Image: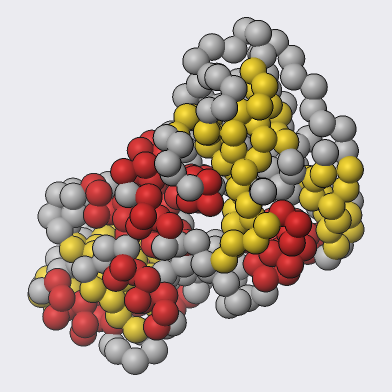
Amino acid sequence: MKSVQVTGVGTTAVVDVPTPEVGPTDVLVRMRACGICGSDTFYISIGGIPPRQGETPLGHEPAGEVAQVGADVTGISVGDHVVINPIASRKGMIGSGGPGGALSEFLLIPDAVLGTSLAVIPDHIPFAVAALNEPMAVARHAVNRTQPKPGDKVVIFGAGPIGLGAAISYKRSGVGHVVVVDVIPSRLEKALAIGADAVINSAEENVVERLTELHGAGATAMGHPRPDTDIYLDAAGVGVVIDTALAAAKHRATLGIVAVHKKPVPVDFGAVLGSEVNIVLSMGYPTEIFEVTKDIVAEWEKFALIVSDEFDFADVQQALALAGTPGAADKVVVTFS
């Protein structure tokens, strides 16, 4: 079969590798779609992940069709459409340093267990949308970490895939109002299309003033005026977001951080002491990988808007190049004919 591997610093290749053999507890999935993540482009930039430096298989956002089922596996049948937990296997994470990657024609799921390793999805869900399951689980975990309550007023900084996924999850959790902040008009239009109640272009508007207009007036413990926003979520990863959120936070507001910050962000804790702000960080998806699957099945048309570019596997190098170009695309998904 053909598989995409990191072959050196800044280089990838489509290589021929043996199709995996299926043991009695394994499932073999014919890949039908795989998203490209920012971490994929990072792995390329450093030449792969030890101990597979120079030959790291790529792809950890998979959706596919079951091709073979081991004799001891129950609840899974050939032909089932599935999404996959890339961190479930004890034998190595899929596409993140393990022996297999989802940017391959086939993917072996060792010790496959329904509901732990993979989940079956309805046949009408497009595979390109199903491939969002993994990043949307990241977004769902970020939402869960902020512990939203019905009626809460939320602002999300960053209208990329994680921010948009979080917006859908917040709305499904029953919050009262969701605002999305970004500087790119097309992203803000997409945020409204997936269900955000309002958007703010931070390049053109004062975020704090606009939040006060949208969410009403709140205050710190000392009575200093603040927007009445309950939850701030950083899905952008730039220091000004942290500065803005902490300066705007009312008494006991929550700041969630799911974005990867590549530079240290200084915080004046004395200045925010009176807000008693709750700061929570979010990484991965301890329990959310198939929790979010239900959301995708229920509202797949909204999630479909998150996919900005689709490429056939034959053009995977072009897809990787686009995904690795800052600002060129929001979410690139590779599909398999």
- What residue do we see at 34% from left, 84% from top? 201
255 and 162: which is toward the camera: 162
136 lies above or below 222: above
Is residue 62 at least partly visible in the picture?
A: yes
117 relative position to 208: left or right: right
- What residue do we see at 59% from left, 33% from top? 65
201 relative position to 306: left or right: left
Is residue 220 at least partly visible in the picture?
A: no
**Residue reaching furthest to the bottom:** 204
- What residue do we see at 53% from left, 19% from top? 76
Residue 64: quarter of image: top right
Expressed as whole percent of the image width and height from the top left, the position of residue 59 reads 68, 48
Expressed as whole percent of the image width and height from the top left, the position of residue 313 reads 71, 54
211 relative position to 28: left or right: left
83 and 116: which is toward the camera: 83
104 and 312: which is toward the camera: 312
Expressed as whole percent of the image width and height from the top left, the position of residue 151 reads 13, 55
25 relative position to 288: left or right: right
**Residue reaching furthest to the top:** 72
Residue 205: quarter of image: bottom left
